[in-house]
Image (cartoon, rainbow, N blue to C red):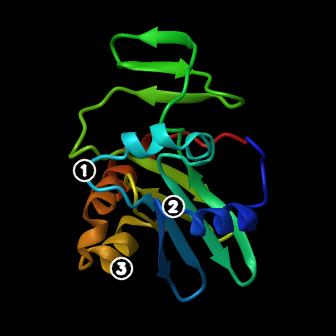
Amino acid sequence: MVHESPREYLEWIKGQKDLKTVRTDTNDFALIDVAMRAFGGDTKVYLENVILQEKMRRGLTFIEKESKLEIARQGLPKFFDFELDFLNSESKSCKVKPSDYPITVYNLEKLNGENAQISWSPMVNKWIVCSKNVGFSAASVEEATELYSAIPRFNYALHIARHWFNNTLPKLQHVD
């Protein structure tokens, strides 16, 4: 895959008939979520488009502030090969190495085919909390609830944020 700038990547996405973008503006910046237009499953679309397989990720959100554009979160490709380095049957997790970067994958119960992706954005000093195709930013559970609880498209992401802020984040240790 050719690594292009975030701006070039977003322009390529906007030119694809099978992809759509949804922009969420805040006072200071915007989040741009990318999703498939396919109804009833996207596997056929991916199988028919090798370039889409290589370039599109399962969960992709851009963040734009002033004239600067960055990738806020980028999931795994729809189809990828990985090597299992470690399998822990108690936590149902494994270390994998798809392409160039190490990640940890956890085997959890899925809610309506959703997934959770959380990243930190130094550009806006907030967490980017995402479900499968929807992302938002928040510094706290209170901010997330205040800004997004009345918007139905954020329901799953808000559930993820509540768990992140109330259960997971307090257990993490700061590492310098």
Q: Disc 1 to disc 3, how far (Cα)?
A: 30 Å
Which quadrant is the C terminus positioned in? Answer: top right
Q: Is residue 125 left or right of residue 143?
A: right
86 or 37, which lies in front? 37
Q: Nearer the viewer, residue 48 or 76?
A: 48
> Dot 2 lies on which element?
strand
Give the number of the mark in front: 2 or 1.
1
Dots 3, 2 in contact, CB < 8 A: no
Q: Residue at x 43, y 46 (%)?
A: 45
Q: Name which residue type carries label 1.
A: Gly
Q: Residue at x 69, y 60 (%)?
A: 9
Viewer-side residue, 27 vs 63: 63
Q: Which residue is mark 2?
A: 128
Q: Is residue 153 placed above or below 131 in the rendered structure?
A: below
Disc 3 and disc 2: Cα gap in Å?
Answer: 14 Å
**Up-down: is 96 above or below 4?**
above
Q: Residue 171: x percent and y percent?
A: 44, 40
Q: Which residue is mark 3?
A: 147
Q: Is residue 18 visible?
A: yes
Q: Residue at x 75, y 75 (%)?
A: 68
- Mark 1 and mark 3 in contact? Answer it, CB < 8 Å: no
SS state under label 3: helix
Give residue 138's position: percent from left, percent from top.
46, 69
